[in-house]
Amino acid sequence: MVREPIKVSSIINGKKIDTERTLPRENPTHPDEVVGYAPINTREETIQAIDAAYNAFKEWAWSDVDDRIARMKRAIEKIKDSTDEIAELLSREHGKALYDSKGEIAISLMWMEFACDHVKEAVTPEIKEHENGRTIITFDPIGVVSAITPWNYPISLSTIKIAPALLTGNTMVLKPSPFAPLAVSRVCEIIADEFPPGVLNLVHGEAEVGVELTSNEKVAKIAFTGGTRTAKSIMKAASETIKKMTLELGGNDAAIVLDSFDVNDERALRRMVISNFLTAGQICMIAKRVYVHRSIYDKFVEKYIEAANKWIRLGDPFNPDVTVGPVNNKNQVQYVRSLVEKAEKDGAKVIPLGQILNPELMEEGYFLQPTLVLEADFHADIVVEEQFGPTVPILPFDDEEQVIELHNESIYGLTSSVWGEEEHAIKVARRIEAGTTMINTAAVQGLDVRFPFGGVKQSGVGREYGVEGIKSYTETHVINIPKSLELPYIPE
């Protein structure tokens, strides 16, 4: 059923701002349908939002932490009450299955509640009594935070920044992706309504908005999730004023299946399939390449195909039986398709996976049938590049030294997973270069918001989630009160 398009606003200094120029967001399932319109803000409006955050920070930085927590908890309850509405909007603009949209909101709320429960632990001053006197260490807010978020998990990758930033006394200007701007705007509106004007601002727009958010001298920190190439530009823009940064970037996350893995474990194989194809493979931490010990390779592939054909059900995100919806946008469809076609042209074997539940939509929407790629070269594009779509290569390896080298030669290191007997898997995991390594599970299934998350090498800078993620929005301030105010070795 086609509905009237909605229109979301920007939020600057507590006021909703509409613009003459707007950006339409189509429905990936039915691209002829416009789900809604987001504003296109100007550089001047972006400066206004930054100024509003800068001015609000002067008081908000000294607000009571219990008041901040109470405000955030009220927002959490309102988001919970609106979950069905927000999830439906997210599925329409993004393409992810409805259960997946509700799951994203659930993860977001889980993190926001954790941040509320642990912000005091992160910001409570430490007092050290010692032989030289007393030292007080405080954890102070940084200032104005620019947050730039992607389209694949627009709500969770925004709230992962909003909650710790505001709870620790910072103010924020957030810019979502134009490929999924609607549902996250609703969430931001709910949160902003609970906080003083200027504490949380929302802008949309094109390159000039991003440039201002990353170069304006009043911005103290940048929190960005997205591609490594974009991050390099952001770092250059930010270098003029030496801004703090948390960057969660791309990954080419590998799953390593050891010879101790039980190929008859149907639940484990289902977890593997989900780790490859949840959200149509459009997750930064999804398992994008699978290495399997040659001694179990043939049997693993056979059982994997069985598991994939059971779980993958492609179609309309609002069909309750569907597990995989369309890809988010046309460019991504073309990119993933080009990788698969090149692999096949170079001699790889491509196997379609899953069931198509709504065949009438396949040509209409941005649909790609999930595929398994076998017999690819270790250094083929589909293996070494981040596909960010519903395809995965499975490759055999002969020994652990070989597979560890294959894993670690990547420029990326976000997450990884090792599958097999637990102690055996842990031993291999210790040698993996990654921010997070999961044992016998992968991707969102192994995510725990209580612990820090982020990448090594070109997969990022800093950590989100956990108390460490909250503290990343603070500056450490040391106040020394020595017993003796004069040093004995300095002459009078």
Image (tube, rainbow, N blue to C red):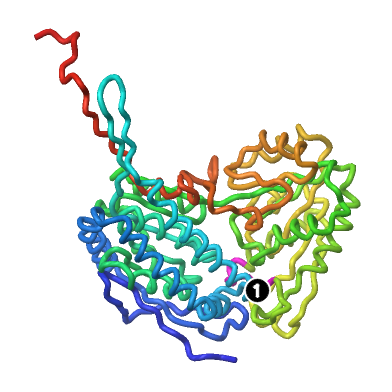
Q: Quadrant of residue 97?
A: bottom right
Given residues 208 and 90, the one toward you in this image is 90
Q: Position of residue 219 (x, y in %)?
A: 29, 53
Q: Determine whether, in the image, residue 436 is placed left or right of residue 277.
A: left
The answer to whether residue 240 of the structure is visible from this angle is no
Look at the magenta stretch and give its main secondary structure. loop
Q: Position of residue 61 (x, y in %)?
A: 25, 54
| Quadrant showing the C terminus | top left
The answer to whether residue 150 of the structure is visible from this angle is yes
Work out whether 365 lies above or below 312.
Answer: below
Q: Determine whether, in the image, residue 183 is placed left or right of residue 282.
A: left
Given residues 156 and 220, the one toward you in this image is 156
**Residues shaded magenta:** 324-332
Q: Residue at x 76, y 80 (%)?
A: 357
Given residues 73 and 380, the one toward you in this image is 73
Q: Amino acid at mark 1?
A: Pro
Q: Residue at x 60, y 59 (%)?
A: 283
Q: Residue furthest left?
A: 492
| Quadrant showing the N terminus | bottom right
Q: Determine whether, in the image, residue 287 is placed left or right of residue 119.
A: right
Q: Which residue is mark 1?
A: 326
Q: Position of residue 476 (x, y in %)?
A: 32, 39
Based on the picture, tell me whether residue 369 belongs to the magenta stretch.
no
Based on the picture, tell me whether residue 330 belongs to the magenta stretch.
yes
Work out whether 281 lies above or below 25.
Answer: above
Dot 1 alpha-carbon crowd within 10 angstroms: few under 14, some 14 to 19, many 20 or more: many
Q: Position of residue 430 (x, y in %)?
A: 66, 34
Q: Residue at x 74, y 66 (%)?
A: 370
Work out whether 30 lies above or below 202.
Answer: below
